[in-house]
């Protein structure tokens, strides 16, 4: 927490900050010595005060139960040269006899703090006394039954310390894996487990990419040429009957057509014979199925 804070102007009223940076020492008599402005009148909810900030100032008492900054804060605003100055405690460390009973964040840089004597419950905020006037005569009062006592809370603020964030990157190596858009440089992977990554690959040079493209194109053209040659050869075979030279060289070779009928091929020899006319009584024999 900061130890000093500059005065602030709000709606024509200056607020000056009174720092209390150390716990005010404990004095045991502050827990029993009390005072009352108009006497103790419980029927009118007028109760005695303990730990009053005005001790040793307006009240004739040698006790100083709270720090001087708390007395200035309790007396309220002052006017100097037509300028109103209000006093607030901050930063604030609770007195040794007090404990923190409430904290609340006012803004991103300040926190409200309320301190009460140990053993007391916080009831409500009290307005500033606005100055104590008149004469108070010390007196001893004996109480015949327990009554409530009012202890003055100490209220103030604490402020966050301004920090500067450095933009210098840390050089400390991290032991935990982190997600990064940087391509991975790892050369090992688990067997059988494909690696999925959303990062960009290391990339190939433009020359390598061009070479791969040309090679793929030539391979496709070669494959098309082979397929075209096979189809053209089949068409030629279908359009022309088999010649003598294309018949199988082995007379015993057999080939089953698609209708599962056996067909025999034999080599024909050229013989110089004279054509003869078939007799009229001859009959054409039908081949068996």
Image (spheres, grey):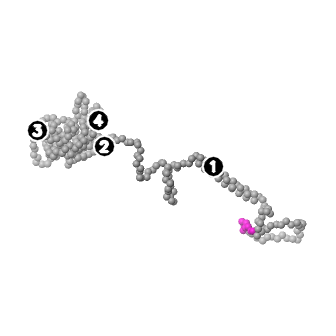
Alpha carbons under labels 2 and 1: distance apart: 70 Å
Residue occupied by mark 2: 105
Q: Which numbered tag is attached to residue 137?
A: 3
The quadrant the C terminus occupies is: bottom right
Q: Which numbered tag is attached to residue 214?
A: 1
Q: Secondary structure at mark 2?
A: strand
Q: Is residue 131 at least partly visible in the picture?
A: yes
Which residue appears at 79% of the width and 68% of the height?
Answer: 266
Q: Is residue 106 at least partly visible in the picture?
A: no
Alpha carbons under labels 2 and 3: distance apart: 42 Å
Query: Which residues, given as a range, are shown in magenta?
Result: 253-260
Q: Sequence-wise, which precedes: disc 2 or disc 1?
A: 2
Alpha carbons under labels 4 and 3: distance apart: 40 Å
Q: Closer to the camera: disc 4 or disc 3? A: 4
Residue 183 coordinates in the image, percent (x, y): 49, 49
Q: Residues within 10 Å of mark 4 (few under 14, many from 20)?
A: few
Residue occupied by mark 4: 6
Q: Are marks 4 and 3 in contact (CB under 8 Å)?
A: no
Q: Are marks 2 and 3 in contact (CB under 8 Å)?
A: no
């Amino acid at each position: 927490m900061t130890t000093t804070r500059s005065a602030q102007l709000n709606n024509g009223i200056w607020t000056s900050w009174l720092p209390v940076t150390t716990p005010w020492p404990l004095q045991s008599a502050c827990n029993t010595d009390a005072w009352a402005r108009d006497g103790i009148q419980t029927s009118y909810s007028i109760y005695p005060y303990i730990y009053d900030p005005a001790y040793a100032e307006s009240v004739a008492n040698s006790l100083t139960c709270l720090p001087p900054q708390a007395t200035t804060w309790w007396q309220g605003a002052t006017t100097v040269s037509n300028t109103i100055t209000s006093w607030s405690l901050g930063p604030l460390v609770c007195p040794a006899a007090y404990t923190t009973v409430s904290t609340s964040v006012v803004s991103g840089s300040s926190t409200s703090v309320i301190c009460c004597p140990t053993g007391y419950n916080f009831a409500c905020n009290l307005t500033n006394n606005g100055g104590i006037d008149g004469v108070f005569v010390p007196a001893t009062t004996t109480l015949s039954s327990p009554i409530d006592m009012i202890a003055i809370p100490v209220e103030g603020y604490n402020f966050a310390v301004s920090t500067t964030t450095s933009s210098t990157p840390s050089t400390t190596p991290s032991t935990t894996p982190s997600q990064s858009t940087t391509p991975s440089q790892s050369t090992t992977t688990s067997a059988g487990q494909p690696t999925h990554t959303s990062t960009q690959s290391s990339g190939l040079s433009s020359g390598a990419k061009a070479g791969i493209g040309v090679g793929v194109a030539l391979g496709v053209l070669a494959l098309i040429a082979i397929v075209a040659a096979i189809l053209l050869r089949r068409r030629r075979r279908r359009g022309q009957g088999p010649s003598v030279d294309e018949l199988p060289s082995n007379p015993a070779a057999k080939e089953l057509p698609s209708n599962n009928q056996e067909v025999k091929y034999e080599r024909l020899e050229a013989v110089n014979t004279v054509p003869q006319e078939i007799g009229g009584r001859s009959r054409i024999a039908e081949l068996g199925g």
